[in-house]
Image (cartoon, rainbow, N blue to C red):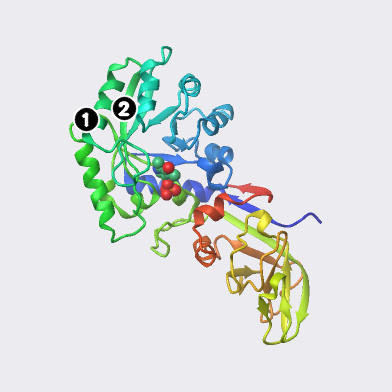
Amino acid sequence: MTRPARARIDLDALRHNYALARRLHGGRALAVLKANAYGHGAIPCARALADMADGFAVAFTDEALALRAAGIIRPILVLEGAFDADELRLANRHGLWMVVHHEHQVRMIEYQPDLRGLHAWLKADTGMRRAGFSTQAELADAHARLSASGKVADITLMTHLARADEPDQTATTRQIAAFKALTGGLPGDRSLSNSAGVLGWPAARGDWSRPGILLYGADPMPGAGHGLIPVMTLESRIFAVRGVQPGDAIGYGGRYVADRPMRVGLVAVGYADGYPRSAPSGTPVSVDGRPSRLVGRISMDMLTVDITDLAGAGVGSRVELWGRQVDVNVVARAAGTVAYELLCNVKRVPLDYSG
Ligand SMILES: *Cc1c(COP(=O)(O)O)cnc(C)c1O
């Protein structure tokens, strides 16, 4: 028997979520595949969306070139833009769309002789205070210089929302207003919305959306009932069962002490597979489709679950760590992090594709 830990990836669910995002936002949608498609495998996900996605977005040029090498011919936007002139030339040769968010990137385009037909996404900083041009004068100046460079065929205006997952946040309203003010009068398509923008902020709609986490079925506003379908199921099996007595401490550090006779299942998955070590006792799991919980600390290669009250559960039982039965957002909250980090940390386990 091979080790039973795996991540099942449902590509039909991915297509469902993409179509939902596109329908909700309107216009066109770049499917964000950075960080190996948030742990789901960038190339299989790109191929699954190749016939329906208007384009893709990744963080780095290398990620985009890997998609090109795999035969992906749709537009690909590089969200961090180019770090140097060689990279910019290479990106241009492969027809990549490049975010331009700093003065030095504008200069790089101006002074690079053999660029042509570049599609630039000019980034306005409307409140994230990370990357982007934050005054109207700077943005207009960058826009004018790119337009006059003779190397840029198209300029899309974009910004990124910092708090769109908080429904009542006036910060997002202010960002939307700031974007209008900064870009007023400049020609070109507009793009404001990440997943939370698509799901929660009709006022942030533009010509292009950039959904990421929602494609993978993890709602950035958990519990909001948007109809997303989880794409990844992280699962394994129980490979041994043991009884423990009241007073027995389970696992490293003796963190969980049994207060009654218990049956504990050993599950072949651990933090080396990306399951968070910080998940405490009580974090939900599903055993053969029935709710259960972690007991004791997560080990590198295994973890322990309570099957005391699950008649029939034992060696060979299927354990879902997250997926359709166990919301990855719930596990993330218990572990003190976000679904983004859990998903893109998945490693070592085989990815099994269907759909
Ligand atoms: C990562 C990223 C996105 C996607 O964000 P989600 O919250 O995963 O939808 C969109 N735009 C930019 C600029 C990003 O960096």
**In the rendered view, does 156 fall on the left or right side of 309?**
left
**In the rendered view, does 179 fall on the left or right side of 50?**
left
Mark 2 beta carbon near ligand 1 (under 8 Å): no
Residue displayed at 28% across by 47% down: 204
Foreground residue, 292 or 340? 340
Residue 319, how many percent across, how many down?
66, 65
Residue 295, how many percent across, how many down?
65, 74
**Disc 1 residue type (three-letter):** Leu
CB contact under 8 Å: marks 1 and 2: yes
How many tags in the picture? 2
The residues tagged by marks 1 and 2 sit, at their Cα atoms, a distance apart of 10 Å
Residue underneath mark 1: 186
Quick one: label 1 or label 2, which is nearer the N terminus? Answer: 2
Residue 249, how many percent across, how many down?
72, 79
Residue displayed at 40% across by 21% down: 108
Residue lying furthest top in this view?
113
Q: Is residue 348 above or below residue 65?
A: below
**Label 2 neighbourhood size at 10 Å, few (<14), some (14-19), many (20+)?**
many
- Residue 259, quarter of picture: bottom right
Q: Secondary structure at mark 1?
A: loop
Residue displayed at 41% across by 29% down: 98
Q: Secondary structure at mark 2?
A: strand
Numbered mark located on residue 319 in the image: none
Q: Is residue 312 visible?
A: no
Residue lying furthest right in this view?
1
**Disc 2 residue type (three-letter):** Ile
- Residue 320, quarter of picture: bottom right
Residue underneath mark 2: 155
Q: Is residue 15 above or below residue 98?
A: below
Ligand 1 - quadrant of the structure image: top left
> Where is the N terminus found, in terms of image quarters?
bottom right
